[in-house]
Image (spheres, grey):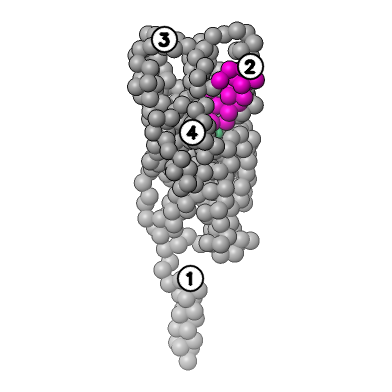
Amino acid sequence: MKKLLFLLCLLAALLLTGCGGTQAPRANTDAGDYIVVGFSQVGAESDWRNTNTRSMQEAPSERNGYRLIFDDSQQKQQRQITAIRNFIQQEVDYIVLAPTTEEGWDTVLSEARAAGIPVIIVDRMIEVADEELFTCWVGSDFRKEGRTAVAWMEEHFGDQPLEIVHLQGNIGSSAQIGRTEGLDEGLAAHENWHLVFRGAGDFTQAKGQELVEALLNEGVPFNVIFAENDNMAYGAIDALKAAGLEPGRDVVIISFDANRAALELILKGEISCDVECNPMHGPRVQNIIEQLEAGETPPKLTYVQETSFNEETLSPEVLEWREY
Ligand code: AHR
């Protein structure tokens, strides 16, 4: 009888644990059976970022067994470090980090490692002494994006003289570093391409507008704006129009992200070339977590496939199927 009771208990225990025994027990008991994910987001500086937040909130959601703890760092790295420490204290199952800048993560990620929490990096990249401090990364090849924009400029202008205004994203972020490197390569290869201004617009529309307004007020001559994202391009366009200039005709605008609204501006002739940066990372992160939960090893680095759009090739039909 005792033996039968023991066997019944064993069977019940196996059923309760799902028999497999490969899944780590959920650390956060308050969250029941959910997989708890702490997500530290850069902020809400751009349309791209807001789409990315939506994608992250919709994919790994309570509908499919996740509980996402979302933290907006308002573009401040220190706030992200605090958020990660809070996630560690809450004993989340995974930490997902969309980093503001590349450097400065070693200490806090060592703390996450000591707590045994896998860290997934999304969108921008980080620079750490020990690559084992993060489990894997998924995001964009920002240098390639910069080179794609420069390839379009080469095809379009060749060695014609250009007076270029360069609106940078927040300094030290991979998106800024890669796109700036792309332009620098173009500048080095074309002696007639002149950089008349370079400054950080932090990926925001307000700063993009402010910087271009100031240049126009100072009377700095330019015929190209290389804006490192769509929102800065929108701000630049507003400033040009307010000064009576016609974007696309008086000043060529090159941008990044390729949000739907920016593609509409290509069709109107205001933006000439826009290099895509894909924000739909939610399902990709969910897929990585599912692989980890299944005991598999996802690729360390996953680059998202991206394209570019320009005034010669974009057709209105593209907008019909565009997700963002
Ligand atoms: O890291 C991606 C960049 O960050 C996007 O180009 C920009 O719009 C966002 O703020």
Residue at image mark 2? 243
Neighbour tally class for label 1: few under 14, some 14-19, many 20 plus, Cα within 10 Å:
few
The relative height of residue 323 versus residue 212 in the rendered view (above or below) is: below
The amino acid at mark 4 is Leu
Q: Secondary structure at mark 2?
A: loop
Give the distance between the C-alpha atoms of the residues marked 1 and 2, in whole angstroms. Answer: 68 Å
Q: Which mark is residue 267?
A: 4
Provide the residue span drawn in magenta: 227-246
Is residue 236 part of the magenta span, yes or no?
Answer: yes
Residue at image mark 3? 161
Which of marks 1 and 3 precedes in the sequence? 1
The amino acid at mark 2 is Ala
Neighbour tally class for label 2: few under 14, some 14-19, many 20 plus, Cα within 10 Å:
few
Q: Nearer the viewer, mark 4 or mark 1?
A: 4
x and y, in percent, of residue 257 in the image: 49, 34
x and y, in percent, of residue 139 in the image: 44, 40
Identify which residue is drawn at 35% across, 16% down: 158
Which of marks 1 and 4 precedes in the sequence? 1
Give the distance between the C-alpha atoms of the residues marked 4 and 3, in whole angstroms. Answer: 26 Å
Residue at image mark 1? 17
